[in-house]
Structures are given as structure tokens and as C-alpha cells.
Amino acid sequence: MSGKVGDEVLAGIEELLPVLRDRAQEAEDRRVLSSESVKSLEEAGMFRLLQPKTFGGYEADPVTFYAAVRMIASACGSTGWVSSVLGVHPWQLALFAPQAQQDVWGSDENTRMSSSYAPTGKATPVEGGFQLSGRWSFSSGCDHATWVLLGGMVWGADGKPQDYRTFLVPRSEYEIVDVWDTVGLRGTGSNDIVVKGTFIPEYRALSIVDTAKCATPGHEINKSSLYKLPWGSIFPYAITTPIIGMATGAYETHVAMQRERVRVAYLGQKTAEDPFAQVRVGEASSEIDAAWAQLELNMRELMRYADADEKIPMPLRLRIRRDQVKATGRSINAIDRLFENSGARVIAMGTPLQRFWRDAHAGRVHAINDPERALSMYGQGEFGVPFTDAWV
């Protein structure tokens, strides 16, 4: 995608930020984003950034996509989270067989997908495909999607797992169960998905083996370097970037609030004149900048290998996962420091900073943000110890 188109999308999203900021409390209260917000993001081009040109997308550089997510999340954490999740799915669909892409986008290139990747359902091989059933949780933005990507183990006749696949299921074949009532990310509508036995043709099931090798059926029609990247690099940052955005929004809110705040307990001293408050702002801003700088560096290097049509080295893939979980941790640390520095009024419901604080901590518990697991894998790679985790 040309830089001009990318800049236009980012400019359009920037214009939406005041409206998204104003709707943040409404999204939290309703436990789901408004259709107006999703439509506005669609019209700005958010959901086409990683979509293949074959089906009307922009095939943007990943950094452009993540920059858009960060901006949105700086206004509303829940909106940023849903935008990132729904926005990364077109990239994954581009890896599926061409017929699967045609099924989804053939009649409407604005069609959206939600997801739930934990293999909590059961997939049994049958002639021509799989029989899928089960219940999946945490499908963010599912009310604004008409397809869903569901993770599942494929079980053989011997009762042993054969493969992990992502299954593409149309809205007519699943039920949404409203269970989402949480302390954070309340506006994401991350409800449960129930499938009561449906046939999934082979071409609508993507193997983790193919995504790990960066050699997928979708390459037949989508030749861009963008689709030669590992799922284990692209998707994890789609979870971390909203949290970086929440930290960015918390920082902006905090600085604006503290410039005029007077700390009565300290004999009328302005917070802006407090050296300890100044230090905390310095610490928080450095953590946020470091998280973003590593993301940019890693994505640029990843794209250099893909553009050269070279195999992406495992040390880089491991480094990306290392930096991704550290970026989440840095963002949480930054928000915590800002929260501590804000005074008692910040705990009132309805204030932006406490919402960012809750939303970020809710995002932290996503499975992809497990720091010990990712850091252990990095250490194994450095020490030459074999590991089998496919989510790299």
C-alpha cells in the first residue's frame, strides 16, 4: 500500500478520536461497541489495512496497522481492542485457501470475522472436511462479525491429537451467548461462541503447521510479502498494541490533569512542581516509548526478510515474542505509575484514567501475554535447548 493511502487512513482515524473518547463510557455501560463506532472505523479504512488487494484491501505495512490500533486505544481501550482483533483477521483469512476467502468476501468485501483460538471444541475428520462442535470464550467484537475463526484440535480415530487448526465458521452455524460482564475491557462484547455440530470443508480449516512454516494455501493468490510473516509474530502484537495505546491515552490524560492539580496535603504545591511526580512521568513515558520502539524495529526487520523472500530466522521470531510480552509489561508499569501519581479523585467511576487502568490489566491476562512462557522460549533459543511451542 502506498504511504499516501496509509496516511489517509491514519488521518481519518485521528479525526474519529474525540467521538470514540466520548463514547468510551457508553461502550463500557452497554458492554459492547456501538454499531456507529464500528461503521465509522470501517469507513475510515481500519479493517482493510491488512486485507489483501485481491478483495479490496490495502495490504498495509504492519506498522501502519499497529499505529492505527494504538491511536484508537488511546481514546477508548475497548474500541482499540476490538479494532485490533477484527482488523488482524483479514490478514489471517488471506492465508486460507482462495475458496475460503471467496466465501467470506465474495459478496461483501466489508465482511468481518471475530475469533476464539483456545482449542476448547472438538474437530473430528470426516469425508471432505471436519465435524466441529463445542463452546469457545472471549470472542471480542463478535456482535459486529458474521463469521468466526475458531481454534480446535483435530482428533484421530485413535483418540490422539493430529493437528491444531483454525476453523472458519459462518454466522448461521453458531450461537452467541451473552456472558461478558467484567471489570475491564467491558465494551469489547467478548462473548461465548457455541457450535452444535457443523460440517467444515477442508478448505476452511487452516493448519498451524502451515502458518508456522509461513507457507499457506492463500499464497496462491496473495503474493505480497505481508502474507509471508509468521502468525506467531503478527497476532501477539495485535493483543499488545491496544495495551500500548491504553498506556498512551492514560499518559495524555494524566499529564493534562496534573498540570493544574494542587496537592492540598503538601501545602498547596502544584503537582507539576513536585519532583517526585516529574520522575514518575519520566519513567512512564520512557516505558511507553520503549514498548513502541521495539515493536517498530521488529516489524521493520521482519518485513525486510519477507520482502527479500528469505526465511525468517528463529532468533528474530523469538525476539519478537520476547519484546511483545515485555511491551505489555512496560505499558502496565507505566499506567500503574501514572495511576499512583494521580491522587484519590482518579478512583471515581467514569474518569478516563481508571478505565485505562482496568482495561489494560484486563488485556494483560490474555494468554498471549504470558511473560514467563515467552521469555523461557527466548532463553531456550539462546541456550540451544529444543522447544516445541508453535506460537512463535
Image (tube, rainbow, N blue to C red):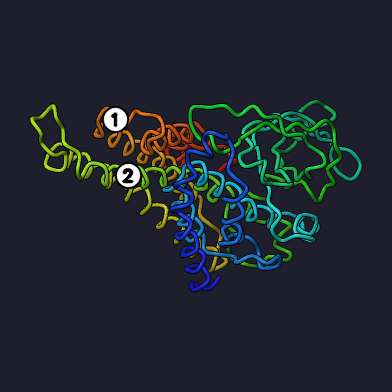
Label 1 to label 2: alpha-carbon separation = 13 Å
Q: Quadrant of the C terminus?
A: top right
222 over 247 or under it: above or below: below
Q: Seen in the image, is 240 located left or right of residue 195?
A: left
The image position of residue 227, as x and y in percent, is 62, 60
Seen in the image, is 113 located left or right of residue 132? left
Q: Position of residue 99 (x, y in %)?
A: 81, 58
Residue located 32% across and 33% down the image:
336
The residue that label 1 is drawn on is 345
User: Is residue 55 or residue 359 the one in the foreground?
Assistant: 359
- Horizontal arrangement in the rendering, residue 64 relative to residue 128 (left or right): left
Q: Quadrant of residue 355?
A: top left
Q: Secondary structure at mark 2?
A: helix
Q: Is residue 227 visible?
A: no
Q: Secondary structure at mark 1?
A: helix
Residue designated by label 2: 253
Front residue (pair 285, 183): 183
Q: Which mark is residue 75?
A: none
Of the two numbered discs 1 and 2 on the same chain, state the one appearing first in sequence: 2
Position of residue 251 relative to residue 183, above or below, is below
Name the front one of labels 1 and 2: 1
The amino acid beneath tag 1 is Arg
In front of the other: 203 or 56: 56
Picture residue at 83% right of the left edge, 47% below the top: 202
Q: Is residue 220 left or right of residue 71?
A: right
Q: Residue at x 8, y 30 (%)?
A: 267
Judge the density around disc 1: few (<14), some (14-19), many (≥20) Cα neighbours within 10 Å: few
Residue 350 at x, y percent in the picture: 41, 34
Q: Quadrant of residue 247?
A: top left
Q: Quadrant of the N terminus?
A: bottom right
In this orientation, does residue 4 appear?
yes
